[in-house]
Amino acid sequence: MTPALIGIIPPSGIGIGPISIGFYGLGYVLAVGVLLLVSRGEAARRGIDPARVTGSLLLVGLCALVGARLYHVASDWARYADDPLRIVLPPYSGLGLYGGIAGAAIGIAIIARRERVPVLRALDIVIPGTLLAQGIARWGNFFNQELYGPPTDLPWAIAIDCAHRIAPWTCPAWPEATTGFHPLFLYESLLDLAGGLIALLIARRAGARLRDGDLVAFWMIWYGGIRIWLETFRLGWAWTIGGLPTASWIGIVLVMAGVALLARNRVRARTGEAG
């Protein structure tokens, strides 16, 4: 099997004199920029001062970082059990997206309460930008040679060097020069970007028919479904419940919660209940 479309093993970053800049970090900076730009536009469209979005960046970003780190530590606890100080001491390698989203949602809820904006409305504002940002940030996994699936001979397979292989696809049993892998990061990136564009379209076309929380429900169903599907490709999970990856369980809960939230909103719409 020869990787065809993305067959070149990527560099992890660029060096400028003594300074090394990782592409993973650059991807997150770009993702945050897009998230801010899109969310400011959505806030303005809903009659909310876009400066509120920018002003919330520090708290929301901090909450997202803490949540992402905690999720990673919980999912990989065996790595930290014997030396818990590694949780808070550099290098800080390891973040979990589900934890980051949960942390960011908590930060947004805190600010929304303070600003007297309905929490679900505040979350709806950031949903399109969040999905677009997720799609952009996932390319950091490409440069870090992570988030890949089993070997494949599909033309869009990616190369993974021996140092980044996980069992059972280690070298030399699976030669570096001839083995390609499913680019799970790419699958998620494309689906996230598509979801972001769909969310923007819904927000603009549905207009007054939307109720607070509809876009949150869309994210739950869309992203929960993505993760349920992607987890079927992955092996070697350290954090499972009943033999199923915890990420899959979270995806299932998200889809169910999203459907329930949409159903609640439709019932309220029929009865004329506010919210």
Image (spheres, rainbow, N blue to C red):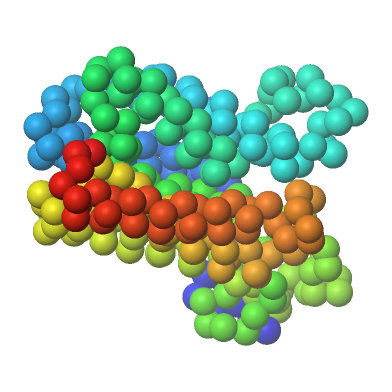
The N terminus - image quarter: bottom right
Q: Which x, y percent locates residue 146? A: 63, 55
Name the residue located 56 percent from the left edge and 38 percent from the top edge.
99
Q: Is residue 22 visible?
A: no
Residue 71 falls in image quadrant: top right
Name the residue located 30 percent from the left edge and 24 percent from the top edge.
112
As drawn, is 14 to the left or to the right of 208? right
Q: Which x, y percent locates residue 66? A: 57, 26
Of residue 253 and residue 105, the one placed in the foreground of this image is 253
Of residue 156 and residue 47, the one placed in the foreground of this image is 47
Vertical position of residue 225 compared to residue 33: above or below = below
Residue at the top extreme, as displayed: 114
Q: Which x, y percent locates residue 42? A: 18, 40
Q: Which x, y percent locates residue 108? A: 37, 28
As drawn, is 75 to the left or to the right of 7? right
Name the residue located 44 percent from the left edge and 39 percent from the top edge.
28
Of residue 129 and residue 113, the one placed in the foreground of this image is 113
Residue 44 falls in image quadrant: top left
Name the residue located 76 percent from the left edge and 53 percent from the top edge.
240
